[in-house]
Amino acid sequence: MSTIVSRLDITQVFCDVDDFCKQWEQLWQVIPQLPSITGERRSRSRMSISEVMTIVIAFHGSGYRTFKEFYTLHVLPGWRGAFPNLVSYNRFVELMPWCLMLLCCFLHTRTGEITGISFIDSTPINVCHNCRAHAHKVFKGLVNWGKNSVGWHFGFKLHLIINDQGELLAFKLTSANVDDRKPVPEMTEDLIGKLFGDLHLKLIELDLQYELEDKKQQEQERDRENRKQNKEREAIDKARLRAEEAEERERLHQKEIDKIRQEIVQAKDAERKQLEMKIQELERLVAEDRSDRENALSETRRLKSGYIYIISNIGSLGRDMYRICMTSRSQEDLYIREMNPAVPFQFDVHFKIFSEDAVDTLQKLHQRFDDKRVNVVNSRRDFFQVSIDEIETAVKEIQKKSGVFLRIDEFEKYPQAYEYRQTLSVRKKHRLSNTNEEYSEVNEIA
């Protein structure tokens, strides 16, 4: 009988599997495990779990029809040098179920690279012959009847996605009666580019360009926001550094003044006059340093401070929909007016809050209502589905607990919505006018 050689590099497979098992062992020592069943016996094996997994993986690349032939004719006679602790075939079969979960987890770590071109297909996995399907008990409740271009089969269906280089990207096991299109959204969540499938899938050249462009746009918005925050942070750091440098210069100059004043006591008239002139110069420098420090601190406060606006637009967005935003401008008319062209009605200001650290105050408000955010994908869309009473309570709590200065300049609980209310009034008058005209026509006909 000719020798069948494995198509896999067993040494490389074992190294990858063994590294994975070591990482997994560290993980399950941290995560609490389910308690053992009372009276359960777990006999130890002289073979490690990574050795068992390697042999199971090698079987699928060996070309043997059955695992028994592979183990008894190939592993036991020829692999004892690589696996000195080999066990009998019957014992190995007992060990195989213990590595099933780890094999599934290991498979998830072997996915290929997303190249932008992917292919999807499915294949049936029969659990028994069709004639014995009615008596099948092993996978009862998990499998079902399915039909493909070949015919009927009873069992599972394996859905696969690979890239243009044949590398596995995603997989899912379902019962045979599941439509091939059903698992596609879940399997393609992280894919970009184009997905190709068979005719019967109705997924020929499924274009994922929209998801790609959306991810690019989100990435650009995140980068733009990060650049803006970094620029503001750098400006604050520079102002703080200038204040620290001015404070250090002031301390050194003051120290020099104190030293000279001690020397004046023992100095003669001519020398004393020179020392007094030196003190006057140093006092001038101290005054300049103090002024520089105050200007730098003032600049730091100006950069960090700002106004928090809580606004609504019941005509455009409905009730209990509020935007919590921030600006460094003190005139809300200019800031709010820029939002109005995008909506049919004007925004109403409910809160105008001045904060010495506006970014921190805004983050606290956003975190408070994070579970009520309207757009959970783009955090820059700072609209929240929340009542004005909840917002009022949150603002007062932050004002009480916050360590920074917080001042409520304006508070209007109920929206004015002048244009929206006028529009409703005009529509109501128009409906009444139309009703009266119809009533008059009916009377004339009568």
Image: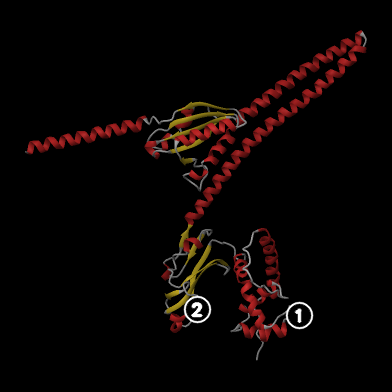
Q: Residue furthest top?
A: 269
Please tell me which residue is depicted at 42% across the width and 77% down the height of the picture: 149
Residue at x 63%, y 86% (from the top left corner): 69
Quadrant of the rendered structure where residue 7 is? bottom right
Give the crowd class for mark 1: few <14, some 14-19, many >=20 residues within 10 Å.
few
- For the residues labelled 1 and 2, the Cα–Cα distance comes to 36 Å
The picture places residue 206, in percent across and down from the top left corner, at: 45, 62
Is the residue 283 above or below the residue 419 in the image?
above
How many other residues sit within 10 Å of disc 2, few (<14), some (14-19) or many (≥20)? some
Q: Taking the image as drawn, is residue 58 in sight?
A: no
- Which of the numbered marks, if any, corresponds to residue 81? 1
At a point 37% along the width and 36% down the height, the residue shown is 315
**What quarter of the picture does the C terminus occupy?**
top left
Residue 180 horizontal/vertical position (percent): 44, 68
Give the secondary structure at mark 2. Answer: loop
Secondary element type, mark 1? loop
Q: Position of residue 358 (x, y in %)?
A: 57, 32
The disc at residue 127 is 2
Q: Is residue 277 above or below residue 247?
A: above
Write down the quadrant of residue 279 in the picture.
top right
- Count every numbered label the image shows and give the total: 2
402 and 45: which one is in front? 45
Return the residue nearer the eye: 141 or 431.
141
Q: Amino acid at mark 2?
A: Val
Q: Evaluate if marks 1 and 2 touch, with contact meaning CB atoms under 8 Å apart.
A: no
Mark 1 or mark 2, whichever is nearer to me: 2
Along the line of sight, which residue is nearer the eye, 226 or 402?
Answer: 402
Q: Position of residue 331 (x, y in %)?
A: 50, 26
Answer yes or no: is residue 75 visible: yes
